[in-house]
Image (spheres, rainbow, N blue to C red):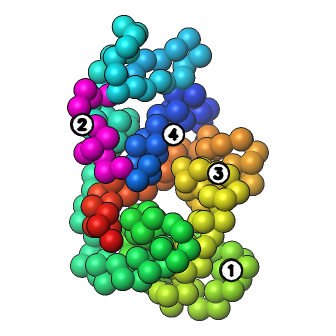
Amino acid sequence: MAAAYPATRARVSRIAALALVLLSGIAPSVAFAGGGLYRYVDERGVVHFTNVQWDKRYSRVKPAALVLGSDAFTFRPPHRRARAYDPLVTRVGLEVGVPPALVKAVIHAESAFNPRAVSHKGAMGLMQLMPATARSLGVSQPFAAEQNVAGGTRYLRSLRERFGSWTIALAAYNAGPDAVTKFGGIPPYRETQKYVRRVLTYYRQYHPQFAAR
C-alpha cells in the first residue's frame, strides 16, 4: 500500500461530488449541459458545487477538471478481451443490483481483464478477490470468470449497503471496510483515493456502453 498522507476536506469532497455526477444514473454529458458547473471553497476547505451561479463566490469549473481531478488518468482502451465479459458483467450486475458499467470499471482497475491475475498480496482473478474474501463469498474457483465476477459484485453490493454510498464502497473495496469505518469515510491513503478516481473515470467511459441496456 502506498504511503498515507493527511486527507483534506476539499479532496474528499471533490471525489464525492464526482461520484454524484457519475453514479446518479445521468450520463455525464447531460449533467454538464446547460449553464455549466460552478464551485467555491469555504473557510473549512469544503468544496461546494452548483449548476447555477446564484452566489458570486462560485466560479466556473471545466468538466474535465472535475472528472480527472489533480491526478489525471488517461483512459486507454483495454485489451479486446474486455468486450468478451460484457454479457457476464451485464447479467451479474443487473441480478445483484450494481451498475454493469461500474462492475466493468472495477475489473479494469483491478486486473485489466486478466482472469489469471494475481497481486503481490495474493488477490486473485478479474475482481482481485483476497483468499479470505473469496471463501466468505463461496467462491471456490477464483480464477473462473463467472464465480469471480459474481462474488466480487456481491461483495461490492454488500459494501454499498453497509456504507450507503458507491464511492465509499469503492474505497472499502480497495482499503478494506475496517479502514473506512476507522476514518469515517474515504481513508487518507493516496492509493485508495487514486483508486476511487480511477474507477470513476473508467465508469464514465463505460457508462454509454450499458446505458441503453
Front-lying residue, 55 or 126: 55
Disc 1 to disc 4, how far (Cα)? 28 Å
Q: Nearer the viewer, mark 4 or mark 2?
A: 2
Residue, far top? 56
Front-lying residue, 85 or 188: 85
Q: Position of residue 52 (x, y in %)?
A: 34, 22
Disc 2 to disc 1, how far (Cα)? 41 Å
The label on residue 164 is 3
Residue 179 shown left or right of residue 120 in the figure:
right
Three-letter residue code for mark 3: Gly
Q: Earlier in the sequence, mark 4 or mark 2?
A: 4
Extent of the magenta region:
26-37
Q: Residue at x 27, y 75 (%)?
A: 79
Q: Earlier in the sequence, mark 1 or mark 4?
A: 4
Q: Are marks 4 and 3 in contact (CB under 8 Å)?
A: no
Q: Is residue 49 above or below residue 24?
A: above
Q: Position of residue 19 (x, y in %)?
A: 46, 45
Q: Is residue 195 visible?
A: yes
Q: Position of residue 163 (x, y in %)?
A: 67, 52
Q: Are marks 1 and 3 in contact (CB under 8 Å)?
A: no
Q: Residue at x 51, y 40 (%)?
A: 16
Q: Earlier in the sequence, mark 1 or mark 3?
A: 1
Residue 146 shown left or right of residue 158 in the figure:
left
Residue ID for mark 4? 16
